[in-house]
Amino acid sequence: MAKGIVIIGGGLSGLTLAFLLQKKGSEAIIIEASDRLGGRIQTVTGALGAPLELGATWFSEAHINLLELINELGLTKYPQHSEGISLFQTKSFEPPQQFFVPGAEFPSYRIAGGTQMLISALAQKLNPHNIHLNKEVTGIQQTDNNLILTTADGDSFDASSAIICIPPQLAAAKIQFSPGLPAPMAQVLPTVQTWMAGALKFTLEYDEPFWRNKGYSGMLYSHAGIVTEMYDHTNFSADKYGFTGFLNSGATAYSPELRKELVLQQLSELLGPKIMNPSAYFDKVWNDSFVMEGNPVILRPHQNNGHPVFSDSYMNDRLHFCGTETAAAFPGYMEGAIVAAKAVVASSFR
Ligand SMILES: Cc1cc2nc3c(=O)[nH]c(=O)nc-3n(C[C@H](O)[C@H](O)[C@H](O)COP(=O)(O)OP(=O)(O)OC[C@H]3O[C@@H](n4cnc5c(N)ncnc54)[C@H](O)[C@@H]3O)c2cc1C
C-alpha cells in the first residue's frame, strides 16, 4: 500500500502533526486503531444537546501552542465557571465544609462546542482518504530503504518515515520493532507514565442550573464519596447545564448503573433532590487497549515524560516518537501533544 509519511495514532498529536506537515506541502497517512479520531479527547452529547467531556477539558493561558492552534482553527475559548460556594467533603459522617470562591483570577478555559471541536476542525483540514480507522499497528520493520508497518487485521503499509503518536507505554506493549530498538529506548518505553491512564471521568446534563441559582459554584472536592472532584459544566451559550468530574479509582470495579446511582446519591445529599433527574449521565474508565496495556512499571505521575530518548530518531532516521508524553514542555496535556508535533516537524521535516 501507500508509501510516504505514516502517522500512527489519530489523537491530538497525530492530527496536529498531519496538519503541520500538510502546511509544509507533505501529505501524511494516519493509521488509527479505534473507530474514531481524538484518542483521549472525547466529547459526547447530552439528550438536550450539551457537549459533555469524558476526556480532556481544560487549558490555561500558559498553553500558548494550544491557544495558537485554537485561534488558527477559528475556535472559541471560554472560562470555566468557578464563582460561588464550593464544597469539601472531608468525612462521610460530617457536613461538608463550604468555601466561597470569587471567580478565578487566572481561569481555566474550555472550548466552545466541546474539546472535540479541535479534533473535527483538524480532521476537516486533512484529506479524508489519508485517514484509516480500525487499524491497529502491531509491527514496524526496517528494510534497506523504507519501513513496513503491519496492522492487526493483516494489512501492511510501506513508509518512507513513520511517526508514533501513541502513548509510549502502549507502543512498547503493542508494537513489535524489527530490528529491536536500541537498549536505552527499549528500557525507557515501558516505564513512561501515560497521563490519565486508568482515570474515571463522569458527566451529567441538566435543563436548569439549580445549584447556581442557590449560590453554589458546582465545585466539589470529596474524600467521602464516589465523586472525588467535580466542576460546573455549563455550555458556552449558557443554556445547557451540567457537571463533569472524576470518580475514585475503586469505582472501576462497579457497573456503570451502580456508579450512576452512587454519584446521584452523593450529589443529592449535597445539592438537593433535583440532582436525581439528569437528562444525561455518562462515564468512562480510561483503561482500554487504546490507552494502556498490561501492568506498566509506573511509580509517579509524568514518570519519564519528555525523556531525552524521544528527541532522537530511530531505524535509520525513519522512525520518530511524538505524542504528548514525549513533549519537552507540558507532557501529558493537550499543550504537550502540540509541542511534541511541532518538535518532530522542526527536527525531522523542515
Ligand atoms: C480523563 C482525561 C482527562 C484529561 N483532562 C485533560 C485536561 O483537562 N487538559 C489537558 O490538557 N489534557 C487532559 N487530558 C490529557 C489529554 O487528553 C492528552 O494530553 C491528549 O489528548 C493526548 O493526545 P495524544 O495524541 O498525544 O494521545 P492520544 O489522545 O492518546 O492519542 C493516541 C491515539 O492513538 C491510537 N492508538 C493507540 N494504539 C494504537 C496503535 N497500535 N495503532 C494505531 N493507533 C493507535 C489511540 O486510539 C488514540 O486515538 C485528559 C485525558 C484524560 C483521559
Image (cartoon, rainbow, N blue to C red):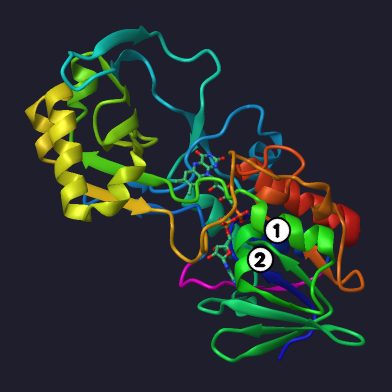
Disc 1 + disc 2, Cβ < 8 Å: yes
Nearest the viewer among 186 and 198 is 186
Q: What residue type is labelled 1?
A: Leu
Q: Which range is magenta? A: 26-36
- Alpha carbon separation for disc pair 1 and 2: 6 Å
Mark 1 vs mark 2: which is more N-terminal? 2
Where on the picture, by quarter, is residue 90? top left
**Residue that badge 2 annotates:** 172
Lateral position of residue 144 relative to residue 242, left or right: right
Assign the C terminus to one quadrant of the image: bottom right
10 Å crowding of disc 2: few (<14), some (14-19), many (20+): many
Q: Does the magenta stretch include residue 34?
A: yes
Instruction: Name the residue located 56 percent from the left edge and 56 percent from the top edge.
Output: 296
Secondary structure category for the residue under label 1: helix
Q: Which residue is labeled 1 in the image?
A: 189
Tell whether circle 1 marks a residue whose Cβ is less than 8 angstroms from ligand 1.
Answer: no
Q: Is residue 106 above or below residue 25?
A: above
Question: Residue drawn at (21%, 52%), measured in percent from left and top?
Answer: 47
The quarter in which the N terminus is drawn is bottom right
Can residue 239 be seen in the rendering of this structure?
no
Work out whether residue 132 or residue 79 is closer to the camera in this orientation and state it. Answer: 132
- The image quadrant of residue 154 is bottom right
Three-letter code for the amino acid on which mark 2 is drawn:
Ala
Q: Is the magenta stretch mostly helix, strand or loop?
A: loop
